[in-house]
Image (cartoon, grey):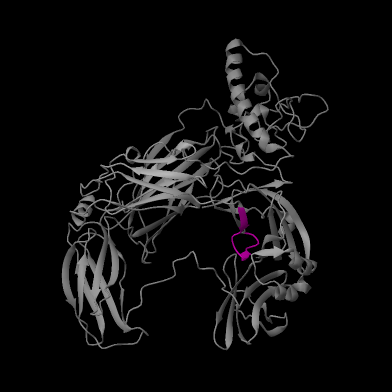
């Protein structure tokens, strides 16, 4: 799980997203919603605000006291995060108050499991400490899947020799053979007791009480960068990933590598994950310090988390280039500090490496277009250029591969990207790249789709090849068709045609069970091969319907029009198909999205809601048509929204539906109100606007602001 952290110095926390959640009478319009100080009528920018000052009736006073108290509590809770002296904390992590057992829905058939494990004894196989989502957890493994309906908290007891009983929720794994208890404290001596009578799915029970003792591992506070090198798009970068464990704050210094020192810097930088004091004396003179700051991490307690340092909003780090980031936990000093090299660039660089050449491809990270005229240089370990080239209109160039080639640099204007040739270009440790298991004979199965409905015919095609992908002598293949419950539905022998191409049509029964089906192929090598497809109840959309109305508000005297386009998903136009639909007319009170909370038009105006049934429309030979709705609301004093809900009928009568809205505006100027202000005070009532633009409180030399009234 990756989340963003908040930069603490020197940036303040902004609560603009919560401005409408605060009382409008206590919000600074000049600062767009920053909370005010609790002991004055000014915000943190020293702007004056509209504050309640006039006496109210008793009922209104009691109502406003309650509302003012709620607003004050919300403001006081936000005051700490607006301080200039404290770093801005990240959102508080969600803790798990575990008092009940977690009972996930079984991913397998309990009856089938009971039959498979019939007669097997239930025992505890292993008790150990494991890592789940970066946190320590206790894992208890069993020989037989457990019955998920029992209360595990009554059968398993975990006791800390220091603090007594350990609270938590026992989680049952998907295969029902493992119980887990999350968030163990480090360096604790624990005693686990499993009571006799714990029940398995085959009705077997634990014969005797089981007791196990273990000591949890120690957790040292650590912090470091998640990668030894990163390419961050200039406009799309969210942050620099770091991994933290029990470290709340870090100080980070960012150095930009000087362009003329780039070859020498890369020659001395070995791609390590840290920077020692000795190495810094040689490397840092080739770079310039552009920014340093403190960041709040606030990871969950005793949990190793991957977080993002927000660098997109830091102006000195918006210039493209190669950067060196050096980090340390706040308040600590050591000989070696975590460090990483990252690039801010829009040049995406990919290289195909052969025995004697390099095929280099460049493309824009924003948009994906090929980049031409990009200079590509190859450097050796000493920083000398050993090959050069420029990309063509397809973003491609071909370069020789010298024996000492170490780094490839691609640069155009201010954009620079690099790729090391003496190390992995991409860390694939966290990705499943193993692929299918190798076999002496490979049977490649493919079809038009892998999702079918009960009663349909599964179309299968196959090619038999050796381990090098070459043709082999055709041979019959024994096939087992297995249902989702692992039962064999049928068996057949698949024969090939004269060209060595395998084709088969597998007819599914109308009552075929839904789920994942398998074909098991026996190639007489003792290693069966699998092909999977799904059977589900679904109705595929065969038609696509597009409705396009006006992008701008329509005048009341005009009749709004909709352009209609219908087509089949395989590309043919929906010529001659029938379109039916309804038109819904509704008042649009919040007509200006940039003014949330303001309502427009006459609130006393009635009869603005109408539902109209449209006459059927037939599309032309190109699948097009135009639908015009006659205006009957020219005298309306409020903005209206017209919503067209249309359905395009298939030949069998099944519709494909789409909705499209159009805004009707009765005139260029409309009265507006801010109803949230009515509940705050009479003073704010006097400041309610009646124009299309809201009144803003300005800074004045006196202690209060006079309401600015317009009509």
| Residue at position x 24%, y 86% in the image | 474
Q: Is residue 271 located in the magenta-colored stretch of the structure?
A: no
Vertical comparison of 513 with 642: above or below: below
Of residues 376 and 552, which is closer to you in this image? 376
Left or right: 552, with 283 as reference point: left
Of residues 269 and 57, which is closer to you in this image? 269
Q: Is residue 228 located in the magenta-colored stretch of the structure?
A: yes
| Residue at position x 70%, y 30% in the image | 36
Q: Position of residue 61 (x, y in %)?
A: 61, 14
| Residue at position x 66%, y 32% in the image | 691
Vertical comparison of 617 with 666: above or below: below
Q: Position of residue 579 (x, y in %)?
A: 35, 52
Left or right: 242, with 577 as reference point: right
Where on the picture, by quarter, is residue 497? bottom left
Is residue 237 among the parts visible in the rendering? yes
Where on the picture, by quarter, is residue 531? bottom left
Left or right: 520, with 345 as reference point: left
Is residue 183 among the parts visible in the rendering? no
Where on the picture, by quarter, is residue 85? top right
Span highlighted in magenta in the image: 222-235
């Amino acid at each position: 799980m990756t989340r963003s952290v908040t930069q603490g110095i020197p940036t303040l926390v902004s609560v603009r997203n919560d401005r409408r959640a605060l009382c409008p009478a206590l919000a600074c319009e000049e600062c767009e919603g920053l909370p005010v100080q609790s002991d004055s009528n000014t915000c943190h920018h020293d702007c004056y605000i509209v504050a309640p000052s006039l006496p109210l009736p008793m009922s209104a006073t009691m109502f406003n006291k309650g509302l003012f108290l709620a607003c004050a509590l919300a403001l006081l809770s936000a005051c700490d995060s607006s301080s200039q002296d404290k770093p801005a904390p990240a959102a508080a992590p969600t803790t798990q108050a575990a008092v009940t057992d977690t009972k996930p829905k079984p991913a397998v058939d309990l009856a089938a499991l009971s039959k498979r494990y019939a007669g097997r004894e239930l025992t505890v196989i292993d008790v150990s400490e494991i890592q789940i989502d970066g946190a320590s957890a206790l894992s208890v493994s069993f020989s037989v899947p457990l019955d998920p309906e029992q209360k595990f908290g009554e059968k398993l007891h975990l006791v800390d020799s220091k603090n007594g009983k350990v609270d938590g929720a026992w989680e049952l794994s998907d295969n029902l053979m493992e119980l887990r208890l999350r968030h163990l404290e480090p360096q604790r001596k624990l005693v686990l007791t499993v009571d006799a009578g714990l029940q398995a799915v085959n009705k077997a029970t634990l014969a005797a009480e089981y007791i196990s003792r273990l000591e949890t591992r120690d957790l040292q506070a650590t912090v470091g960068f998640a990668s030894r090198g990163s390419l961050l798009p200039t406009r799309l970068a969210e942050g620099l990933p770091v991994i933290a464990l029990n470290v709340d704050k870090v100080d980070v210094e960012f150095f930009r590598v000087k362009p003329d020192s780039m070859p020498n810097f890369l020659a001395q930088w070995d791609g390590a994950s840290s920077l020692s004091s000795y190495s810094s004396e040689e490397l840092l003179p080739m770079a310039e310090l552009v920014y340093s700051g403190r960041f709040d991490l606030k990871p969950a307690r005793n949990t190793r988390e991957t977080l993002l340092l927000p660098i997109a909003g830091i102006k000195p780090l918006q210039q493209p280039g190669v950067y060196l980031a050096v980090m340390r936990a706040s308040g600590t000093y050591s000989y070696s500090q975590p460090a990483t090299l990252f690039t801010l660039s829009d040049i995406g660089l990919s290289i195909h490496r052969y025995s004697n050449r390099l095929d280099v491809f460049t493309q824009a990270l924003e948009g994906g277009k090929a980049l031409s005229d990009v200079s590509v240089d190859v450097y050796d370990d000493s920083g000398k250029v050993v090959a050069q080239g420029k990309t063509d209109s397809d973003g491609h160039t071909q370069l020789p591969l010298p024996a000492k080639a170490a780094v490839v640099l691609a640069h155009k204007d201010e954009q620079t990207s690099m790729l090391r040739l003496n190390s992995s270009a991409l860390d694939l440790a966290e990705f499943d790249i193993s692929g299918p298991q190798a076999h002496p004979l490979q049977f490649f199965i493919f079809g038009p789709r892998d999702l079918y409905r009960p009663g349909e015919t599964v179309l299968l095609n196959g090619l038999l090849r050796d381990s090098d992908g070459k043709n082999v002598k055709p041979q019959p293949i024994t096939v087992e068709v297995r249902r989702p419950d692992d039962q064999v539905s049928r068996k057949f022998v698949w024969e090939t045609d004269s060209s060595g191409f395998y084709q088969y049509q597998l007819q599914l029964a109308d009552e075929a069970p839904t789920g994942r089906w398998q074909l098991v192929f026996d190639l007489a090598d003792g290693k069966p091969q699998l092909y999977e497809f799904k059977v589900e109840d679904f109705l595929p959309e065969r038609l696509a319907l597009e409705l396009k109305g006006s992008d701008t508000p329509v005048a009341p005297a005009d009749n709004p029009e909709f352009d209609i386009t219908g087509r089949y998903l395989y590309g043919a136009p929906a010529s001659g198909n029938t379109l039916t639909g309804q038109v819904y007319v509704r008042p649009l009170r919040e007509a200006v999205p940039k003014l949330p909370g303001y309502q427009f038009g006459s609130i006393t105006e009635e009869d603005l809601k109408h539902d109209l049934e449209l006459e059927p429309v037939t599309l032309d030979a190109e699948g097009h048509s135009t639908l015009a709705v006659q205006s009957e609301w020219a005298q309306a004093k409020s903005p209206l929204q017209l919503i067209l809900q249309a359905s395009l009928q298939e030949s069998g009568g099944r519709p494909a539906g789409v909705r499209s809205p159009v805004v009707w505006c009765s005139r260029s100027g409309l009265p507006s109100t801010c109803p949230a202000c009515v509940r705050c005070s009479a003073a704010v009532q006097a400041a309610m606007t009646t124009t299309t633009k809201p009144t803003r409180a300005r800074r004045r030399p006196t202690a209060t602001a006079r309401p600015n009234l317009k009509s």
